[in-house]
Image (cartoon, rainbow, N blue to C red):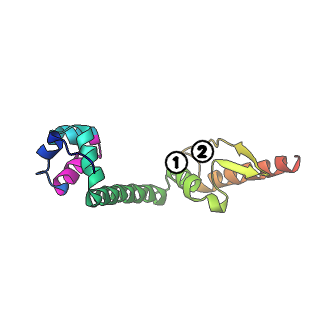
Amino acid sequence: MRRVSQAQKRFDHISDNVIMETYKQSGFNKAETAITLGMSRSTLNIRINDSVELQDMIIDAREEVLDIAESGLLMHVKKGNLNAIKFLLERQGRTRGYGMNVEINNKSTLEALDINEDMTIEEASRMYQDTLVDASMSADDL
C-alpha cells in the first residue's frame, strides 16, 4: 500500500471532474493543470494513477479531440485540399497501395511526391501511380 503524503491529502477535496475540466482547459497539459490547481505535477500524476474514473475521462477526452481533428481533415478532403488528401491517403489508404513507403520484395523505397495546390486530383493520383509502377519495375531488376 502506498503511503499518502500530507501534500496529497491537501488536494483530496478537488474532485476528478474539476481536475478533468482544468486538464481540458489547459489543452491537456499536465504541468499547467497542476499549477492551476495549486499542486505539483507529481501529485497530479498520483491522483490520475489512483483514479480509474479520471483515467477513463482523460482517454474519452483525447478521443473526442481526435474525432474533431478527423472531422476537420475530412472537411478539407471534401473541399479538394491536396495536402489533406495526400495526408489521408498516406495514413489510412495503405491497404489500397497508398503511403510514403512502398515495400517491394522486403526492400523499402521512399518516394517524395511533389504534389502542389495547382495540381488536379487526377494529376496527383497519376503521379502517385507512376511512382508505384517505377518502383515495381525497379524491383523486377532485383
> In the rendered structure, are the residues bearing label 2 and label 1 in contact, judged by CB atoms less than 8 Å apart?
yes
The circle drawn on residue 133 is none
- The answer to if 23 sits in the magenta stretch is yes
Q: In x, y percent, where is residue 46? A: 27, 46
The answer to whether residue 8 is left or right of residue 109 is left
The answer to whether residue 28 is left or right of residue 87 is left
Mark 2 Cα within 10 Å, few/some/many (few <14, many 20+)? some
Residue ID at (77%, 48%): 135
The circle drawn on residue 83 is 1
Q: In x, y percent, where is residue 23? A: 24, 48
Q: How many marks?
A: 2
Residue ID at (14%, 50%): 12
The answer to whether residue 126 is left or right of residue 120 is right
Query: From which residue to which does the magenta span run?
Result: 17-30
Quarter-of-image position of residue 3: top left
Q: Residue furthest right?
A: 141
Quarter-of-image position of residue 38: top left
What is the distance, in whole Å, between disc 2 and disc 1 at their CAs? 8 Å
Which residue was labeled with disc 2? 115
Residue ID at (19%, 37%): 35
Quarter-of-image position of residue 95: bottom right
Q: Nearer the viewer, residue 21 or 13?
A: 13
Q: Nearer the viewer, residue 141 or 127?
A: 141
Q: In x, y percent, where is residue 121? A: 59, 55
Q: In x, y percent, where is residue 141? A: 89, 47
What's under tag 2, amino acid-wise?
Answer: Ile
What's under tag 1, amino acid-wise?
Answer: Asn
Mark 1 Cα within 10 Å, few/some/many (few <14, many 20+)? some
Q: Main secondary structure of the magenta part?
A: helix
